[in-house]
Image (cartoon, grey):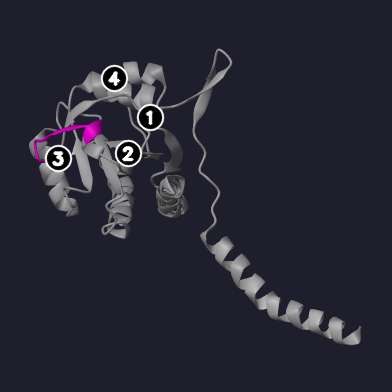
Amino acid sequence: MNKNRGILILIVLLAIPVLWIFLWKKSEFAYTPLPIYSEVVFGDTVAFTIDDFELTDQRGLPFNHDSIGERVYVANFFFASCPDVCPEMNSNVKILTDKFSQNDAVVFLSHSVDPENDSVGALRQYADDLEVDDNQWHFLTGPKREIYDLASKSYRVVSVEEGEGTFIHSEKLILIDKDRRIRGYYQGRDFKDIKKLMDDIPFLIKEYKDNAK
């Protein structure tokens, strides 16, 4: 009896380190799925999704949702002549693009809210000043109405009234998944939020990889 008890104790002692390693590995790679922003319509939960669009990037090339491909992306709104908010926000986006420079599963889109002045040439200069990778970070211009509708009705970073009005502005960065759904809002000038976004991007990419298994 004592011999059996001793064997049992030995097995338990040997199992503890294995169990600890298993739990540590599980916690290391575990994550809480990001929220899917949505609204209730006639009793059904409907996810916020990004509408189709046809814009032009800093290379003068057409850019639409198909251009994103099978990637998640981060979107924001700015204008090239902005003296304070936009430079700070896009400097933080630059930190993100540098962080994910070797990761082709994420792309960054910056929409100009001043398309009358932000021509392709102006965006080309803006992108060059930031030394961006044209394949990773796209500065977009196009019809003002289309951009404002995207800001207000798709990304929901301004109210419909502001979108219909004169000049809109937002400091938010928006994380979008492969299914065009909004998965997070972040203050573009708050480095704590930038750090959170930096952590959330890999989690979102991992979510798709896990679901594909």
Whether the residues at callouts 3 and 2 have beta carbons within 8 Å, the answer is no
**CA distance for labels 2 and 4:** 21 Å
Q: Which residue is mark 2?
A: 75
Q: Residue at x 37, y 25 (%)?
A: 154
Q: Which residues are magenta?
A: 59-66
Whether the residues at callouts 4 and 1 have beta carbons within 8 Å, the answer is no
Image location (x, y in percent) of residue 125: 11, 45
Q: Secondary structure at mark 1?
A: loop
Q: Earlier in the sequence, mark 1 or mark 3?
A: 3
Q: Which residue is mark 4?
A: 166
Image location (x, y in percent) of residue 4: 85, 82
Decide which of 22, 44 is in the foreground and name it: 22
Please identify the quarter of the rendering in which residue 84 is found: top left
Please identify the quarter of the rendering in which residue 165 is found: top left
Disc assigned to residue 123: 3
**CA distance for labels 1 and 3:** 21 Å
Image location (x, y in percent) of residue 194: 41, 51
Whether the residues at callouts 1 and 2 have beta carbons within 8 Å, the answer is yes
Q: Secondary structure at mark 2?
A: strand
Amino acid of disc 2: Ala
**CA distance for labels 1 and 2:** 9 Å
Q: Which residue is mark 1?
A: 155
Q: Earlier in the sequence, mark 2 or mark 4?
A: 2
Decide which of 30, 4 is in the foreground and name it: 4
Q: Earlier in the sequence, mark 4 or mark 3?
A: 3
Q: Secondary structure at mark 3?
A: helix
Q: Quadrant location of the N terminus?
A: bottom right
